[in-house]
Image (cartoon, rainbow, N blue to C red):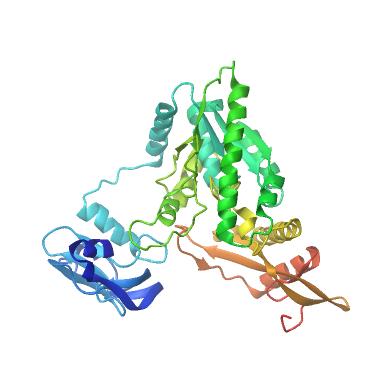
Amino acid sequence: MQELAWHFDAQNVVAGERREYGSTDIHITLDDVKNPLFKGVEGDIITVWASHGDKLSQLPPGFTTIAASANAPFAGIAHNSKPFYAVQFHPEVTHTPQGPTIVKNFAVNICGSKQNWTMQEFKDQEIERIRALVGPTGQVIGAVSGGVDSSVAARLMHEAIGDRFHAVLVDNGVLRLNEAEIVRETLNEHLGVNLTVVDSSNRFLDALKGVSDPEKKRKIIGHLFIAVFQETAERIAEKAENTPAAGPVEWLLQGTLYPDVIESISYKGPSATIKSHHNVGGLPKDMKLKVIEPLRELYKSEVRILGRSLGIPEDLVMRHPFPAFLPTGNAGPGLAIRITGPVDTEKLKIARQADSIFIEEIRKAGLYSEISQAYAAVFGETFTVGVMGDKRVYGNVVQLRAVQTTDFMTATVFEFSFAFLQRVSNRIVNEVRGVTRVGKPPATIECE
């Protein structure tokens, strides 16, 4: 909306008296006949998801108001004679419950889009596009982590060009417990993907020594990963010489999803870049490999549908995301941004063990598929006093995090029972050496 209003006059956009972040209510001001954007929406007042600190000071010429909120008198506007519409909220996210109706009204009823897209058609077209792009001898290298995005991208690439696709798992030292072995077994043995495992954990951990800033962690891991990847690509090309798979390694597969694109790029103005570690950000200018992104126009839920059509097991299709830079995980900051402050082997051990216990208990409780993402984080620079046995100990704090979402752009906290949290807390404090507090474990009342 701001972009449209600014086009007519820069004075149309001003800072709001207060910001609107999160759920808010808007009042629809016109009926369905005069306001086709909100046709079929239930009620005159609807809940939407807002995320802005500015607003329109006045309507652009030729426009009328179709929705308003307490803080934004122009929450929705429409042109009087042309099919121009704008809203100051996010209809595309989970937390705008009637958002799908609004988006459908615009795309189908107003723009005239046809609803004839199918996943099978997408898969067939993408395979043909990959083959044409890569050519008959070209080779592709791609990062994998065992997450759904990288696994689906790898399986799709393998179906398109076979063993000319080389999946690479780089152990960057900040993977989850037993991650490398799980990925090798899943992709190589079960899905038939050509996989190379590169252990560069010491190289990454040396580069991360003493670094506390999470953005610096992301950049260090991202740039070092590209260097490791290019070195690996050269070795793979040399190894493939004089074989049926001979050809230059020119392409880098990325599992970029549509939300990654939205959250990684600031389009004009001061909108923030939310996730610099995502696939679309942080790539060095001198990178020799060209990027190929077959999932770039899909949401997570659509990637899972594609994964099923490619024969990927359900437990992998529904696996929770892991912080990524290239296709979901092993190039990414991983546990480095689930540990506040500097990363070391002791904190990594705590994070891995605590996370494993948390996920194990979630699965045992039958809650895994209800939760979109869950993990245990370590407050690396915060220590608390705990009482274990008959002595006072000074140890780490573990935070449990679990959310629900479908679009992976907005989320709500998953509500566990107290009995579940107590069980997880007790297990972590008892089984993970160096932890004294998880929500409400045995501990003194005061933090210090």
Relative to residue 180, is residue 442 depicted above or below? Answer: below
Judge from the rendering whether residue 364 lies leftward or rightward of residue 272; answer left or right. Answer: right
Judge from the rendering whether residue 101 lies leftward or rightward of residue 397; answer left or right. Answer: left
Residue 144 horizontal/vertical position (percent): 58, 41
Judge from the rendering whether residue 27 lies leftward or rightward of residue 183; answer left or right. Answer: left
Answer yes or no: is residue 290 visible.
yes
Relative to residue 107, is residue 244 depicted above or below? Answer: above
Answer yes or no: is residue 1 visible.
no
Tag count in the figure? 0
Q: Residue at x 25, y 63 (%)?
A: 86
Q: Nearer the viewer, residue 279 or 312?
A: 279
Where residue 381 sits, quadrant-wise, is bottom right
Q: Nearer the viewer, residue 91 or 133?
A: 133
Residue 51 horizontal/vertical position (percent): 38, 68
Q: Residue at x 61, y 33 (%)?
A: 232
- Residue at the top extreme of this rendering: 242
Where residue 195 sits, quadrant-wise, is top right
Q: Residue at x 56, y 21 (%)?
A: 245
- Give the quarter of the figure containing the N terminus: bottom left
- Give the quarter of the figure containing the C terminus: bottom right
Relative to residue 141, is residue 24 depicted above or below? Answer: below
Residue 425 horizontal/vertical position (percent): 72, 70
Relative to residue 15, is residue 410 depicted above or below? Answer: above
